[in-house]
Amino acid sequence: MSRVITIGAAQLGPIQKAESRAQVVARMLVLMHQAKAKGCGLIVFPELALTTFFPRWYSEDQDEIDAWFEETLPGPETEPLFAAARELGMAFHLGYAEKIVEEGTLRRFNTAVLVDAGGEIVAKYRKVHLPGHDEYDPERAHQHLEKRYFEVGNLGFPVWRALGGIVGMCICNDRRWPETYRVMGLQGVELVLLGYNTPSTNSQSDEAPHLRAFHNLLSMQAGAYQNSTWVVGVAKAGNEDGHELMGGSAIIAPTGEIVAQCRTLGDELVVADCDL
Ligand code: CDV
């Protein structure tokens, strides 16, 4: 028996440091309506989708840092996404910076949620593999301060019975590690959702952009094939304040084949009918 869900991979083009959440959410709503017109039951947005990729900027000012984080979800600026899910009857996956008090301790994570078509958060994942460094590094063309701004995720790699199947999530650098998919594979995962912000170049090596794009797809296609799962990998792409992020957002079948892929570095929706 087939269980088909139509999925939209909603790549976001660049978000500049000065751009507001309201501006970004307006772009996301356009993509949600496009997805609805194409029959999507789920739309997938990137890692840290609501702002520029702020870990490239060093700061010692905690107020300045906290301005990148969400203390509530939905909050006043993100509520329109939840309202659109309810109005359109469409689930969404969203990456964001989470600031939360847990057991009396203030904590910050690089997080993703799955929101169902009723606008309820039904699954939450916190990034485990945090790349980069925790102090200012003058050798780098851009900083990558995830180790400064986030704690390692404390939820493991669970799966959820949702959307008529078994769904898992991971975030960006997690996609490069076989155990990410394997832990979910051993729980029977059928659909892995992930967002990424990946620089097109590495200022510490001479790796060419085409090789980095190959590694992006290699990791996700291998994870899909070796665990017989759909993988939906969605980029935030393009030039953010002078720094290039790769695109290449893709919907990958359990065979390892790419069935839909973005061609631009801007806001772009690609869609596939995914039989779980
Ligand atoms: N946001 C990320 O986790 N980016 C890493 C880069 C820094 C290599 C990635 O694995 O794509």
Image: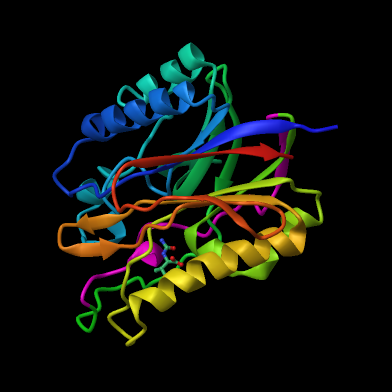
Q: Residue at x 37, y 53 (%)?
A: 263
Q: Looking at the figure, which quarter contains the C terminus?
A: top right
Q: Residue at x 49, y 26 (%)?
A: 38
Percent coordinates x, y for residue 155 in the rendering: 63, 50
Q: Which residues are magenta?
A: 141-163
Q: Residue at x 60, y 32 (%)?
A: 6
Q: Is residue 181 left or right of residue 98?
A: right
Corner quadrant of residue 82: top left
Q: Is residue 27 left or right of residue 252?
A: left
Percent coordinates x, y for residue 268 in the rendering: 36, 42
Residue placed furthest toward the right: 1
| In magenta segment, residue 56 | no
Corner quadrant of residue 97: top left
Q: Is residue 28 left or right of residue 118?
A: left
Q: Is residue 94 left or right of residue 20?
A: right
Q: Looking at the figure, which quarter contains the N terminus?
A: top right
The quarter of the image that holds ligand 1 is: bottom left
Pick whichever, 133 or 261, lies toward us.
261
Percent coordinates x, y for residue 241 in the rendering: 15, 57
Percent coordinates x, y for residue 67 in the rendering: 25, 42
| 99 shown above or below 56 | above
| In magenta segment, residue 160 | yes
Residue 140 seen in this snapshot: yes
Residue 58 seen in this snapshot: no
Q: How many marks?
A: 0
| 39 shown above or below 262 | above
Residue placed furthest toward the top: 87
Query: Overall secondary structure of the magenta stretch?
Result: loop
Residue placed furthest toward the bottom: 206
| 217 shown above or below 108 | below
Pick whichever, 192 or 66, lies toward us.
192
